[in-house]
Amino acid sequence: QVQLQESGPGLVKPSETLSLTCAVSGYSISSGYYWGWIRQPPGKGLEWIGSIYHSGSTYYNPSLKSRVTISVDTSKNQFSLKLSSVTAADTAVYYCAREEGWMDYWGQGTLVTVSS
Amino acid sequence: NFMLTQPHSVSESPGKTVTISCTGSSGSIASNYVQWYQQRPGSAPTTVIYEDNQRPSGVPDRFSGSIDSSSNSASLTISGLKTEDEADYYCQSYDSSNHEVVFGGGTKLTVL
């Protein structure tokens, strides 16, 4: 069974960089699929942040592209998200997911609050 | 930018049938697959329909998906409504040419 687990700080200061990691078990990232990040502000809808292909090619939401970096570490079977220059508007539950045009496996999500 | 528009909320009684629409802003919604996710409060989304009308294993056949090219929209239909179906539902598609993923704004389904 494929499982994904997000980890990282739950509190980030404004203007700093948000960093999260998604550990994958039950499937080798290097075998295929895209691996993506999605976020959901409190009480609001889902927003795709970006995805990385197992080969390392990246795809980002145009509205966030200037601040987002997604990377993969196949040796640890995990992928990561960095979002720079955060503001309160970046407060959200962040999910990682396996995708191939659609998300078939999701992590449980982790709440990141941007506050001083 | 391609956008997907859903009604903010729908409600229906147990045992009835409800349809949630998802309308594409431009281009043809039929050009790329549409997926539907169910999200209950405090939980991650789960897929109820993928590739327009396919159900993952474990999803009851009360859930069905369709595409209407004439209205450039996708629909999720839930028949024989149960109280456990009460949740938020999101449609999602993607542009295969640049792998841009798009979600609809979500629809809150109330079963009462």
Image (cartoon, grey):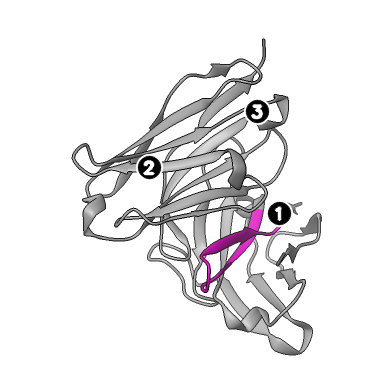
> Label 2 to label 3, Cα distance in Å?
21 Å
Label 3: few (<14), some or many (≥20) within 10 Å?
Answer: many
What is the three-letter code of the residue carrying label 3? Thr
What's the chain of the residue with tag 1? B
For the question of whether residue A93 can be seen, the reply is: yes
- Circle 2/circle 3 CB separation < 8 Å: no
Q: Is residue B31 above or below residue A95?
A: below
* Residue sitting nearer the eye, A59 or B3: A59
* Element assignment for label 2: strand
- Identify the residue shown where x is 50% and y is 75%: B51
Is B91 within the magenta? Answer: yes
Are labels 3 and 1 on one chain?
A: no
Is A46 within the magenta? Answer: no
The magenta region covers B89-105
The residue beneath circle 2 is A71
Label 2: few (<14), some or many (≥20) within 10 Å?
Answer: some
- Which corner quadrant of the image does residue B14 belong to? bottom right
* Element assignment for label 3: loop
The residue beneath circle 1 is B106
Residue A29 coordinates in the image, percent (x, y)? 26, 51
Is A78 on the left-hand or right-hand side of A43? left
Q: Main secondary structure of the magenta part?
A: strand
* Residue sitting nearer the eye, A92 or B77: A92
